[in-house]
Image (spheres, grey):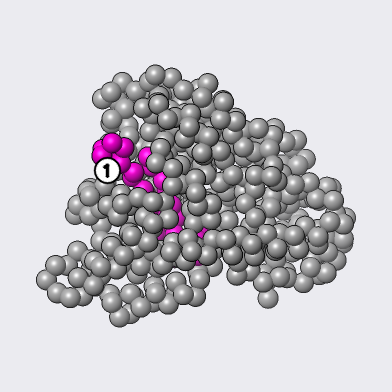
Amino acid sequence: MTVYLDCNATAPMDPRVLSEVMHFFSVEFGNAGSRTHDYGSRAKQAVQRARDQIAEVVKVRRDEVIFTSGATESNNLAILGLAYHGKETGRLHIVSTMIEHKAVLEPLDALARQGFEVTLVPPTRGGWIDPAMVQDALRQDTLLVSVMQVNNETGVIEPIPELCEILADHPAFFHVDAAQGFGKEIAPLQNTRIDLISISGHKIFGPKGVGALVMRRRRLNRPPLTPLFFGGGQERGLRPGTLPVPLIAGFGLAAELAFHEAHQRAKACQAYRERVLKALEPFSPIINGDQTRTMPHVLNLSLPELDSEAVMVALKDVIAISNGSACTSQSYQPSHVLKAMGLPDSIVQGALRISWSYMTEGPDWNEVIDILKRLH
């Protein structure tokens, strides 16, 4: 059986979460917007409980959590939703980075076509953003700073606490795409200087198709977002549509479990990491990204003289791995993240991403080694 090692693309659902999701699909299937019967009341209670579970992780109030279909929608709502306010106030400058997910870079491109000026800060060779470069990019008319918490391709943790300090006295809104860090790297997201946080359910062992945007109040004021589409007025009018109660209930439980089990999960992932590195040691892998700043559940590496596509095909019946973001894998192009880091083409073309979880079992590493030896 192929061992799944692509958890940064999507993670398996925790069995406890799956049980919760199925309960709300099969037993408590009411609409949270129905006010005339107990099915609706119980559905609403489940949604509010999930809001509380997610809010606890980042230390916000229940009403500061808006449910969406995932981090991509949350990113779009956070970025595009500020456009009207930016135009009204004459603040048309945005600071972000070259290594963001496409779900951030493409909304920024859309704003650039509307007349906004976007400054993209390059990373260091280690894949992290130098806070001083963000500080240098700030202007009086900067509306938004958007920096991811953890890079999806390299697993490198970005300096969110330092950026919060830099922005302490600046009026710009601070958005963090936390798809890869929420529930894993806990403390940084609890900083009250972060205005907007994008979260995805399936990256924390919850269901696909659900996420959230945290809209933290600043001096009692919410970030002035306008909705991207319109309908029934759910989620404070910012995200209309019938709430997917089973997915939300599962997402909430996944967030609670991640919060309370973060330490033991990280410890298990670190031990797995050491086994991966030991198994691949004979091939002298080149690790991409500063390993002093990397999450314990992911490795981005290049094997000298081996092409990533050839490796993935050869190993597909033993381990399932990738060479970058799942969102761009349908038409492979060299990683914009690794290219921005200034890595040579040979390293970029040969890069592989291996990512696992606290539930991942080990493959037969001897078989992996034998296959790789035959590729040389």
Q: Is residue 158 above or below residue 121?
A: below
Residue 321 quadrant: bottom right
The residue furthest bottom is: 27
Q: Amino acid at mark 1?
A: Pro
Q: Residue at x 28, y 23 (%)?
A: 89
Which span is picked out in magenta? 195-222
- Judging depth in this view, the residue of 322 and 125 nearest the camera is 125
Q: Quadrant of the N terminus?
A: bottom right
- Judging depth in this view, the residue of 218 and 82 nearest the camera is 218
Q: Is residue 143 left or right of residue 324?
A: left
Q: Residue at x 39, y 73 (%)?
A: 21
Q: Is residue 64 left or right of residue 3?
A: left
Q: Quadrant of the C terminus?
A: bottom right
Q: Is residue 313 magenta?
A: no
**What is the secondary structure assignment of the residue under circle 1?**
loop
Q: Residue at x 85, y 66 (%)?
A: 370
Q: Is residue 27 above or below residue 304?
A: below
Q: Let me know if residue 351 appears in the view.
A: no
Q: Is residue 276 left or right of residue 192?
A: right
The residue furthest left is: 36
Q: Is residue 204 magenta?
A: yes
Q: Which residue is mark 1?
A: 227
Q: Position of residue 57 (x, y in %)?
A: 42, 55
Q: Position of residue 15 (x, y in %)?
A: 49, 75
Q: Position of residue 120 (x, y in %)?
A: 53, 29
Residue 275 quadrant: bottom right
Q: Let me know if residue 36 appears in the view.
A: yes
Q: Position of residue 35 (x, y in %)?
A: 14, 67
